Image (tube, coloured by chain):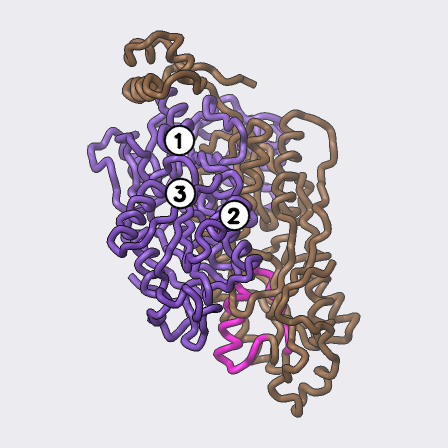
Chain colours: A purple, B brown
Amino acid sequence: MPGPVRPAIADVARVAGVSRTTVSHALNEIGKVEPRERVADAAAELGHRPSLRARSRTIGLVSSMPIAVAGGPSRLGFFMEVAAAASEAALVHGYALVVVPPVAADPPLDSLDIDGAIVVEPDQDDPATRRLRARGVPVVTLGKQQSSDIPHVDLRAPLAGRLLLDHLREQGARRIALIVGGGRRNSYVDITAVYREFADRHRMEPVVVTADESGGEAAGYAACAELLNGHPDIDAICATVDAFAVGVLRALTEHGLRVPADVLVATRYDGLRARTSTPALTAVDLHLGQAAASAVELLLAGLKRETGPQVIANPDPVLVARRSTMRSPGEQQRDAGDDREQWTTAQPSSGSAARPKRTS
Amino acid sequence: MPGPVRPAIADVARVAGVSRTTVSHALNEIGKVEPRERVADAAAELGHRPSLRARSRTIGLVSSMPIAVAGGPSRLGFFMEVAAAASEAALVHGYALVVVPPVAADPPLDSLDIDGAIVVEPDQDDPATRRLRARGVPVVTLGKQQSSDIPHVDLRAPLAGRLLLDHLREQGARRIALIVGGGRRNSYVDITAVYREFADRHRMEPVVVTADESGGEAAGYAACAELLNGHPDIDAICATVDAFAVGVLRALTEHGLRVPADVLVATRYDGLRARTSTPALTAVDLHLGQAAASAVELLLAGLKRETGPQVIANPDPVLVARRSTMRSPGEQQRDAGDDREQWTTAQPSSGSAARPKRTS
């Protein structure tokens, strides 16, 4: 790997009217400030970089998810949380991280000069993964890519799903619906499987609605309206995507249903949306920072041709219970006298509804 | 500028055992899925990228702020909000964005292979700016770099400061203290100047405390404790950094002071911290997304040697009033009978304390 190469010190010294030693000092943050500024100005004046350029080692972080779900308010969603941690981890190992957010209709995957890439929550047969690998760019994924043996960090989607469903049941829900995105992202596939198993075990009719990822909150809203139309008796909704969950909250409110008094709502990713929605959403801490760092390490081990595990299991996700699933002891369901009654007799287990708590 | 270069199609075709046409189709997302996967596997098996590599055009986003203040919870702070918007804007123009967060003790600024860089909220004589320019890398800054004529996006710090101070006064504050970070970042310098002018105009004793950026929330806590010790009669604190403001909230609570009943608190950046703290913090919408996009455009115009403005003024910041400065009509100050009384007679102007509102 090429190391850092110094700029053309002689040229800079000439333009700045200082000695080479002064330039060297300035570049190393030694000596007085004034000559340092002059050196910087001189280098800038040269108008282009010295011809001998170092090439830093670079990895890419790529998302194939639409911005509507990956982005979040102020764009600070799942993907950027991963980007923050991954860029730190990469720098620690001497790599720069290029961020390829899911915005461009045609991201420049074919010309990115990267040594390897992390693809975030890929779909089955993910186009980004395929395009990168077709160029010979080593790829690891954050979350397994379905039906592939690409090295990946296991985000433990089944456990996250079980935590959410068990919690909803513990809070009294008996007719839980699931909203997932279209496509075959691993988290959707795994949580749907867990949900069907859960429904079977508790003799609950499975109700799964698919929402269009690119629709974001509006798609969650539409999916919830569809749910309420076909299944007016649901008492909890597990939305695998936080953007969907926010749309669900709006749809429930517009239908005159209160959260959590009438319907409980939970989502998977504990991001800005979950924390700032009204009510705040119960979600799962996926330890994304650690997952991102592991993905970087997995990728770099591959680049160095080190033998090692091809899968890193992220630590157990942790439920973060919030207001959207925590009924106050005094709160009653809207129509406890109607046909809901039969499955609302279970008492909510919590006495501290307003305070978020963590349960493992 | 080099355009995208196709990988060595013949090699991939040979290893995949398919025709060149099939490879070409696979790379263009045409045709059946199965051969596509085989092509991707073959390219990955080749073990390294074809020798003819395209180099994408790349710009860097660099922060010299310590992670303690730039990062925020889950690292989703000011810097990553800029990164999200800047990476999108860069991609739209065919550039990849390398993220250099403020974590590494020695970020690889001397070996980053970038065509230009955006330095976020530089200090005066910023080391990152200097190192990049010394290498001849064109730099623009987000927020003016003090005492320099480097092209920049003007984040309108004086107006943000005026919005906060006028709002605090409007809400009844008469002894407002200011907490700024050390160093000479433009926002600190500008807001301190605005504060001193404000204090002078309203015949208020100026109380400015400097907190250590690298201390983050703890530094804000310490600064607030220092404030309360020397100036127990302050009735509002304007903390220029959101991490400081969170520390301030904690210090006030520990001193038995209620926010907003006893002391109002406001901060500059309307990020995750401001929105999720208790109480939620009044802050300023700086239009960071637009600022980031403007910085990208300014940089790319420079790279293309287009003549144009060297400064882009961001739109007027907008106050986002939240609970930390909005007293309910019925709420009383702790000790309205003591010496505070003289400057707490002004009535809070708002009757809708719980609902955030926007005022321009």
Q: Are marks 2 and 1 on the same chain?
A: yes
Percent of width and height locating residue B148: 67, 44
Residue A94 lies left or right of residue A312; in this view the side is right
Residue B172 in sight in this render:
yes
In the image, is residue B328 above or below residue B146?
below
The kind of residue tagged 1 is: Arg
Q: CA distance from mark 2 to mark 1?
A: 30 Å
Residue B171 shown in magenta: no
Residue B193 in sight in this render:
no
Q: Which residues are magenta?
A: B235-259
Residue bearing the label numbered 1: A57
Circle 2 or circle 1, nearest the eye: 2
In the image, is residue B144 above or below residue A175?
above
Chain identifier of the residue bearing label 2 in the image: A
Q: Residue furthest right?
A: B201
Chain identifier of the residue bearing label 1 in the image: A
Q: Which disc is residue A86 wearing?
A: 3
Looking at the image, is mark 1 or mark 3 earlier in the sequence?
1
Q: Quadrant of the C terminus of chain A?
A: bottom left
Residue A275 lies left or right of residue B205; in this view the side is left
- Determine crowd level at label 1: few under 14, some 14-19, many 20+ residues with C-alpha closer than 10 A: many
SS for callout 1: strand
Percent of width and height locating residue B354: 61, 70
Looking at the image, is mark 2 or mark 1 earlier in the sequence?
1
Circle 1 or circle 3, nearest the eye: 3
Looking at the image, is mark 3 or mark 2 earlier in the sequence?
2
Residue bearing the label numbered 2: A72
Q: Are marks 3 and 2 in contact (CB under 8 Å)?
A: no
Chain identifier of the residue bearing label 3 in the image: A
- Quarter holding residue A95: top left
The kind of residue tagged 3 is: Ala
